[in-house]
């Protein structure tokens, strides 16, 4: 049995792969092993309890093992993706379950150091977005160097008007604890509630620089920061009603629905088309997937009651077929661009992050 990665004394990020091979050389059929489990001992010898990391995928074909030890041992590879370990020193153990003995009769280990990983991200407004006077700030933050939880105590938001040229103004304290299954799927389950939100109400038109400061429990200070430039337009207003932020979608077909208006219009909603895109693994640099052109003209009496009767057909809707659009499971930013018939430009955009299973 052997752990090939990580190598002993390696320094690792919180997410890493444990992989190798395991077999019983006395087996008369197959590898003689039917499973591998993985544990981590923090500060080995200190008495801290073992951390169960998971059951490895076993039976991966290893031609190199077969060439060296015999063809019957080819399906002896194992691997497990590990995530969510806090910073510290660990001894990683792998235990092989022997078919003949019915027990875990072999093990190997490596000593590694896991470094801390911290991040803060602003999801909305999107980069260079144009919003209405009422909108949501959303994002996520964590610091894995803290002993438990997200490692974030609070998040403070500041706005610098005039595209950042003016001094910053304290906007408020974000609400933390929003579900972030996409973050958890990458960095570990302890970060499943790393999201934050803040409702902005009646912000005057102009260009702004938004800065989010996160107070880390690991450093005891506001040591994490993220910025985002955006513009507030007095005439444009829109919302994505479905899907909601943080939603997990299991269905093969789902809808993107909401409303959009340009109050500079004299008739109708002032919006003549909406383009919808999906960004897989937000922040990864993967190219966007065009999901389609939304149907406009949906009845929205609630919007008309607020903004005026001419906006009673400001609703939009798009049905997305995941298979036809090539949407693999994972985290996505669903982005809706709104085209104004008044300015003849795509003058507003909003984003909602979801997870497709």
Image (cartoon, helix red, strand yellow):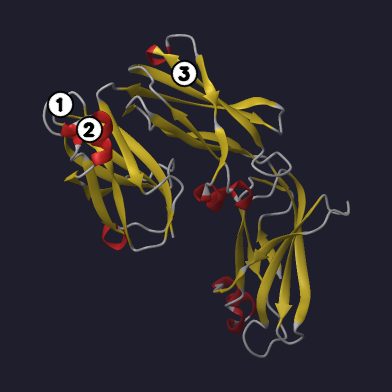
Name the spot of residue 69 as percent of width and height, x first. Answer: 65, 78
Indicate the secondary structure of the residue bearing disc 1. Answer: loop
Q: Quadrant of residue 269?
A: top left
Cα–Cα gap, marks 2 and 3:
25 Å
> Does 158 sit above or below residue 296?
above
Q: Quadrant of residue 128?
A: top left
Residue at the bottom extreme? 28
- Is residue 269 among the parts visible in the rendering? no
Residue 65 relative to residue 260: left or right: right
Towards the viewer: 8 or 228: 228
Towards the viewer: 100 or 334: 334
Towards the viewer: 155 or 311: 311
Q: Check residue 265 in the rendering and tell me which mark sits there, or answer none.
A: 1
Residue at 54% x, 53% y is 185
Determine which residue is flagged by label 3. 159
Name the spot of residue 213 as percent of width and height, x first. Answer: 57, 25
Indicate the secondary structure of the residue bearing disc 3. Answer: strand
Q: Quadrant of the C terminus?
A: bottom left
Cα–Cα gap, marks 1 and 2:
8 Å
Determine which residue is flagged by label 2. 261
Residue at the right extreme? 46
Q: Quadrant of the N terminus?
A: bottom right
Contact flag, marks 1 and 2 (Cβ < 8 Å): yes
Name the spot of residue 5 as percent of width and height, x first. Answer: 64, 58
């Amino acid at each position: 049995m052997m752990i090939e990665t990580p190598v002993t004394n390696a320094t690792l990020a919180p997410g890493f792969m444990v992989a190798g091979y395991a077999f019983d050389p006395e087996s008369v059929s197959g590898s003689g092993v039917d499973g591998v489990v993985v544990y981590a001992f923090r500060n080995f010898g200190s008495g801290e309890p073992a951390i169960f990391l998971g059951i490895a995928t076993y039976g991966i074909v290893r031609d190199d093992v077969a060439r060296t030890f015999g063809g019957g041992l080819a399906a002896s590879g194992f691997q497990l993706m590990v995530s969510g370990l806090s910073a510290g020193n660990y001894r990683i153990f792998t235990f092989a379950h022997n078919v003949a003995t019915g027990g875990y009769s072999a093990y190997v280990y490596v000593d590694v150091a896991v470094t801390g990983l911290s991040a803060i991200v602003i999801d909305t407004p999107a980069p260079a977005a144009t919003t209405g006077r009422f909108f949501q700030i959303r994002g996520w933050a964590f610091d894995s160097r803290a002993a438990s939880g997200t490692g974030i105590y609070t998040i403070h938001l500041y706005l610098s008007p005039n595209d950042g040229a003016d001094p910053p103004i304290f906007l408020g304290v974000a609400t933390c604890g929003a579900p972030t299954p996409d973050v958890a799927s990458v960095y570990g389950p302890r970060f499943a509630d790393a999201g934050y939100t803040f409702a902005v109400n009646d912000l005057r038109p102009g260009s702004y620089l938004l800065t989010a400061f996160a107070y880390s429990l690991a450093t005891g200070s506001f040591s994490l920061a993220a910025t985002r430039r955006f513009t507030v337009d007095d005439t444009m207003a829109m919302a994505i009603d479905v899907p909601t932020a943080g939603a997990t979608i299991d269905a093969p077909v789902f809808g993107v629905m909401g409303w959009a208006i340009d109050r500079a219009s004299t008739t109708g909603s002032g919006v003549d088309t909406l383009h919808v895109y999906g960004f897989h693994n937000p922040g990864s640099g993967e190219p966007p997937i065009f999901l389609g052109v939304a149907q406009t003209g949906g009845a929205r009496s609630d919007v008309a009651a607020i903004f005026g009767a001419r906006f009673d057909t400001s609703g939009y809707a798009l049905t997305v077929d995941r298979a036809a659009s090539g949407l693999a499971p994972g985290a996505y930013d669903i982005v809706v661009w709104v085209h104004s018939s008044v300015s003849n430009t795509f003058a507003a955009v909003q984003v909602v992050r979801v997870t497709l299973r």
